[in-house]
Image: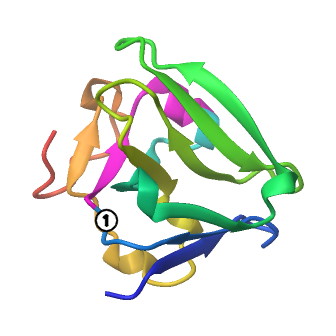
Amino acid sequence: MANLTGSCACGTVKYEVTSPPLKHAICHCVQCRKATGSAFSTNTVVPRPAFQLIAGVPNTQTYTFIQAESSIPFTLRFCTTCGSTVVKVSEHESFRDVALVAAGTADVGFDTLKADTEFWTVHRAGWLGAVEGAVE
């Protein structure tokens, strides 16, 4: 498999992932909905050491939120020009070894990043069905 690459909306912040994704996850929690401005966040979960920002690092900022039900802190890294979130990480034991890459920022292959996991489905919008075959 070729390395996964991606960027923010304006193209200033770029990344590369040098190993295959571990999973593709949708998160329905309130904080992810608010951070994305959408019904859910779509994440490609990769080993943290495999994720590398390769351009635009000085043009990034971070924002940390606490996931309400689990009390797990997540730090978003986003572009200060266009506001696109590129990745989120956490030092909590459940997530410290992974990076959650914003799947929509992938340069190519977005259509192959089908979600196989859904988090916090209790908050899934009523008009949105479950992803067929995904673990909840």
Image coordinates of residue 35 in percent, x first then y, are 62, 35
* Horizontal arrangement in the rendering, residue 86 relative to residue 79 (left or right): left
Image coordinates of residue 84 in percent, x first then y, are 72, 54
Q: Residue furthest bottom?
A: 2
Three-letter amino acid code of the residue under disc 1: Pro
Q: Which residue is mark 1?
A: 21
| Residue at image location 50% in from the left, 84% down from the top | 108
Image coordinates of residue 19 in percent, x first then y, are 35, 71
Query: Which of the 4 image quadrants contains residue 61?
Result: top right
User: Which is nearer the eye, 113 or 4?
Assistant: 4
Q: Quadrant of the N terminus?
A: bottom left
| Residue at image location 53% in from the left, 35% down from the top | 33
State the extent of the magenta-drawn residues as a range. Answer: 22-34
Mark yes or no: residue 43 visible.
no
Position above or below: 37 against 3: above
* Horizontal arrangement in the rendering, residue 102 relative to residue 13 (left or right): left
- Badge 1 marks a residue whose secondary structure is loop
Image coordinates of residue 50 in percent, x first then y, are 43, 63
Position above or below: 25 against 75: below
Position above or below: 1 against 56: below
| Residue at image location 16% in from the left, 39% down from the top | 136
Q: Specify whether residue 33 is painted magenta.
A: yes
User: Which is nearer the eye, 18 or 41?
Assistant: 18
* Horizontal arrangement in the rendering, residue 77 relative to residue 56 (left or right): left
Q: Specify whether residue 16 is painted magenta.
A: no
Q: Residue furthest front?
A: 49
